[in-house]
Amino acid sequence: MLKRKELARKAVRLIVKKVPKEKESILKVDEFLGTLSTAYRKDKLLRNFFLSPQIDRNAKVKALESLAKKYDVPKEVLEVLEYLIDINAMALIPEIKRLYELELEKLMGMLKGELILAKKPSKKLLEKITKTINDILNRQIEIEVKEDPSLIGGFVFKTQAFVLDTSVKTQLEKLARVGGV
């Protein structure tokens, strides 16, 4: 049997191959995989449901179909996930989501990032930060904004391979480490 990481890579390649190449479909699959991955990681009952040999394959497939229908996911993607059910490899979903995001970046020339600020930014400030990040990385960025009051000020921007931390919290921590505070 294939090693788990290689199996996840193959599943992602199949998904990418089967998903229609328009942006909307690609993003729907990403959102679906994100929801499935988060639920799988955080919900022990769901995890046990998919991993239990006691639960009928058809029940697992129906559960996936129900969720996929909400996201309008192409049936070809479900075929890949059904195969994972058949070989009891649903534990790969978080890794598949991660690898799919990397493929999404390549496919669309678009980067997904997380922008964390101490408080919710104004629309104007968010546009300015987004434009600056787009210019620096020379790519289109899809940004998810989160709040973390512990940052005090500034922001943290993260992608799969890049972190930019301008937060006051980090600056104070650096000062404390070198004996400045």
Image (cartoon, rainbow, N blue to C red):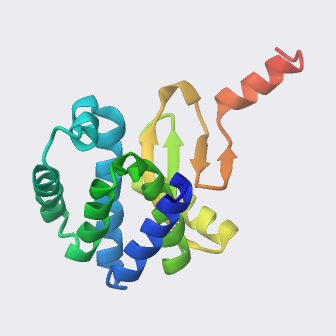
Residue 28 spot, x, y in % from top left: 28, 68
Identified at 65% across, 27% down, the residue is 169
Which residue is the extreme one toward the bottom?
21
Tell me: residue 113, above or below residue 21: above
Tell me: residue 124, above or below residue 150: below
Q: Is residue 41 left or right of residue 69?
A: right
Which residue is the extreme one toward the front?
1
Location of residue 5 by image quarter:
bottom right
Identified at 30% across, 77% down, the residue is 24
In this view, the residue in front, 105 or 155, is 105
Identified at 51% across, 65% down, the residue is 9
Q: Is residue 138 left or right of residue 102?
A: right
In this view, the residue in front, 154 or 52, is 52
Residue 146 spot, x, y in % from top left: 43, 42
Residue 134 spot, x, y in % from top left: 59, 68
Q: Is residue 128 visible?
A: yes
Quarter of the figure with the C terminus: top right
In this view, the residue in front, 19 or 55, is 55
Identified at 29% across, 76% down, the residue is 25
Tell me: residue 85, above or below residue 102: above
